[in-house]
Amino acid sequence: QTAPPAALCSVLFNHSLTTMGSRAADTESDCAIVAFGPTQAGKSTTIGQLALPGQAAPVAGVGDGESVTQDTEVVQSRIGLMLDTPGINDSRLLFTDAEAGRRVVCGVSGTKVQRVKFLIFESSAGDSIQLRSTLIRLFSSFGKEIASSTVVLATKVDKLDEEEREQRLQQLQAVASEQGLPPPIAWQNKKLTPELEALQVESLREALDKLPNCRIQAFVDFDQQVQAKARQLCDAQPPRYLSVPAQVAEQYTVQVPQKYNETEEYMDYETGYESYDDIEYHSVRDDIEYSWDAPVPFFGLFGVTKRMYGIKIRCRDEPRVVRRSRPVKRQVVKSRTVERERMVDEVRTRMATKYRSVPNPFPLNSFLAEARRVVLEEMRASLLAK
C-alpha cells in the first residue's frame, strides 16, 4: 500500500490524538473489545501498543511460538476497553467453548461491561491461513449471531512485500465475506511513523464503531448464576425483624347519658260519690178518733147529751232510712310515663398507633454484590483448575 501524503497523515494524526484524549476520560465503558485468535497472532503486542499512558501493557511474546498470555486481562486503550485473551491453540491452555465465555466474563468482571465486540487476530506472516478455523472456534464458543459484531485484524503485514500483502488480504477478505464479516483491517506494530500509526488506529476505530455491541450468552448465564446465588444467600440469611408503627382500629368504652321513658305507678286522689244510709225525720200526721158526749142544743139543760165523734190530728217526727250520696276522695293507683336519664356504656372506635414486629429480611439486591463475587471466585477457580 502506498503511504498517504504527509499533510493528510498529519491531519489524521492530530485527529487521532484529539479523539484519543476524549475517550481516555471515559474509564468505564459498557462495551469491551475482545481480542480473539491463535497464539502469536500479535494480540498482546497490539493491545500494548494501543494501551493508554499509565496502563500496564500485556506481556507480549518474543516470536518463539510459545504463548505468553495465561489469562484474560483488561486494558484501557485508545479504541476503548480491550480484553486480551490466551491463544486458542495453546496446548497448555486447553479450554472448552463454555470456558471461553467464562474467561471473557471473568476478564471484564471489574468493569460495567455487559456487551462486547470481537477483534479477530490473524497473523499475515504465517504460512497458512488460520482465520477459518479461528472463526469456527469463535462461533462455537459465542454463537453465530456475534458475526455482526466481529471484525478481523490482519497483523504483521509489515513482514510481507506489497504483492504478498495484497494477496493475503484478498484471501482473508474472502474468508471474512463467507461469514458475513466486513473486510479485514491491515495492521502492523513495527516500521511505523507516528502519522501512519495514527492512521491505522483511526481506521480500526472507525471499523469498530460501525459494529453493534452484542451480549454473549456467557453474560446471560453469568447473570442467571448471580441471581441464583443471590437468592440462595437471601434465603439463608438469619431472621431479621423490624418494629414498625401501624394504624389499627381499636375499640374503647365510655359512659354516656341516655334518656329513656319509663312507666311508673303513683297514688292519686279522685273525687267520687258514695251511697250511704241516713236517718231523717219527717212529720207524720196521726189521725186519732175520739168521742165525747156533748149536750144537745136546747136540750142540754135537760141533761140530754149526744155522742160526738171527732178526729184529732197529731203530728210527730218519725225517723226513716234514706239513701243518700256524698262526695268522697279516695286513693287510686295510676300510671304515667316519665323521662329518665341513665349512664350507659358506649363502644367507640378510634385509630391508634401500634408497634409490631414484622419480618424485615435484606432484599435480594443486597446480596447481588456478594453473589457476583462468589460466582466469579467459583468461575476463576474452575478455570485455574484447568
Image (cartoon, rainbow, N blue to C red):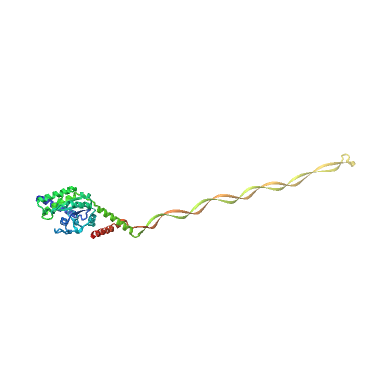
Give the percent coordinates (x, y) of residue 19. Answer: 16, 52
Marker count (numbered): 0
In the image, 263 versus 171, the foreground residue is 171
For image coordinates 30% across by 55% down, the residue present is 228
Give the percent coordinates (x, y) of residue 347. Answer: 46, 53
Q: Which residue appears farthest toward the right when viewing the image?
A: 302
Left or right placement of residue 243 versus residue 313 in this view: left
For image coordinates 51% across by 51% down, the residue present is 259
Q: Quadrant of the C terminus?
A: bottom left
For image coordinates 38% across by 55% down, the residue present is 246
Give the percent coordinates (x, y) of residue 178. Answer: 18, 47
Give the percent coordinates (x, y) of residue 220. Answer: 26, 53
Quadrant housing residue 53: bottom left
The answer to whether residue 147 shows anywhere in this view is yes
In the image, 35 versus 39, the foreground residue is 39
In the image, 35 versus 166, the foreground residue is 166
In the image, 346 versus 153, the foreground residue is 153
The answer to whether residue 3 shows anywhere in this view is no
Left or right placement of residue 42 versus residue 102 in this view: left
